[in-house]
Amino acid sequence: MARIDLRDLTLPEMAALLEEAGQPAYRARQLCHWVYQRLVTDCAQMSDLPLALRQWLAERCYVSTLTLVCRQQSVDGTEKFLFALEDGRQIETVLIPAPPRRTLCVSTQVGCALGCRFCLTAQGGLVRHLRPAEIVNQVLFFCQPGQTPPRPFTNIVFMGMGEPLDNYRGTVQALRILTAPWGVGISPRRITVSTSGLVKRLEAFGKEGLKVNLAVSLNATTDEVRSQLMPVNKAYPLARLLAACRAYPLAPRQRITFEYVLLAGVNDSLADAQRLVKLLQGLRCKVNLLPFNEIPGAPYRRPDDETVQRFQAYLLAHGLSAFVRQSRGRDISAACGQLRYDAQAQPALTGTPPLAMLTPPRRSQGQEKPGARAESRRVESASAD
Ligand code: SAH
Ligand code: SF4
């Protein structure tokens, strides 16, 4: 029988588990405290639990951790962490210092099924969803009980590898664990989930009551261009996506962030800026402009700075909040859209070696053709919505 990873569980699920062991419900809080706050991974060390219960847990359960394979630092201070999962697959997590913030960018899938043409993560298709524990562990890796400051990050964005709402259950469960007082206890206001626009999932997500921030990757102002760039637009065109955004429940001062990757000559004209203003009319929102980060194999270019500024100026002049997001960590392929699952990557190191000893990963150059298996998974997964 497969052992249960305690870091996959919420408080009520831990209570249900402990009931099987004939234990009172309050023990679930103690267990959560060890697993999510004291960060103890050995059941034997959970000293306020009865010895017999510790043994019972050790036989059936475990507490997972990620194995650090490699850590790279960019000239701009951005750090990228390559982690190995239990099955040897690898994911990337990025820590971006932008004083006074330090943003942790986490992955929700190994690869991605959505196939956006400008994104490197798309190129290998979807390999698999992450379990809630694998998402939560990307955060817990950076937390040490008793350290000052308590956490080396101030914000978390679900903008790493994968489409969070395609891994709906994994994402929602991880968010509950990260935000609950019995869990990691991070304010939902400091967490942003980014989606490419799986509308039905977005509608369901709004009803979960999680109170996290929402970002939507818009990236185009006509269905024709958006469908070329993002196949998801064929299932959920702009009108449907924006209607779902208008209906999305927001807290009093909360706004939706619309992300817009600027691609030279594709979606960066003044006519695009005009259409964008119209599309977003009446929405409580802000726009993040992301000048394209070049990736191997994509037929796009980054617009020049003047074009980017002109686009932003038009939005500002027409009442939209618009920011240009300078890409961070480009020299270590850690910027938006540059994360990918590298099947040829070196095997995981076991244990957690001293960080200074770690070497950069071998990254294959050039475009990888998506394999047939990845293609079929892509269709399956996207149509499951
Ligand atoms: N799947 C989610 C979250 C991960 S992608 C989503 O699509 O929203 C995070 C952001 O990176 C998205 O806004 C996406 O549009 C952007 N992005 C992807 N590839 C990029 C690239 N090559 N250059 C700049 N931004 C990119
Ligand atoms: Fe997936 Fe987001 Fe990349 Fe599109 S932009 S392929 S949804 S990770």
Image: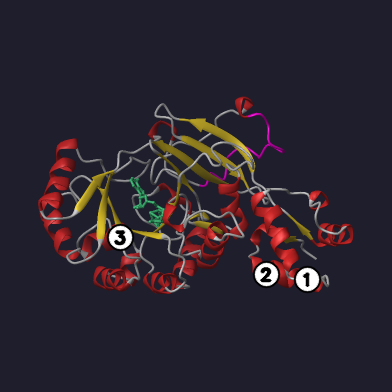
Tag 1 and tag 3, C-beta contact below 8 Å: no
Q: Quick one: SS at disc 1?
A: loop
Quadrant of the frame with the N terminus: bottom right
| First in residue order: circle 1 vs circle 2 | 2
Residue 164 visible in this rendered orientation of the protein: yes
Give the camera-side residue of 137 and 124. Answer: 137
Asked whether mark 1 and ligand 1 are closer than 8 Å, the reply comes as no
Give the label on residue 13, or none. Answer: 2
How did the renderer colour the structure? secondary structure
Give the residue at x 23% y 59%.
225
Is residue 236 found inside the magenta-colored segment of the image?
no
| Disc 1 target residue | 24
Residue range of the region highlighted in magenta in the rendering: 341-354
Give the distance between the C-alpha atoms of the residues marked 1 and 3, in whole angstroms.
42 Å
Give the camera-side residue of 112 and 51. Answer: 51
Q: Position of residue 187 (x, y in %)?
A: 48, 55
- Above/below status of 92 relative to 58: above
Q: Quick one: SS at disc 2?
A: helix
Q: Position of residue 98 (x, y in %)?
A: 38, 37
For this view, does 3 lie left or right of residue 88? Answer: right
Is residue 347 found inside the magenta-colored segment of the image?
yes
Q: Position of residue 273 (x, y in %)?
A: 14, 54
| Disc 3 target residue | 255
Image quarter for residue 241? bottom left
Residue 269 visible in this rendered orientation of the protein: no
Q: Label 2 amino acid?
A: Glu
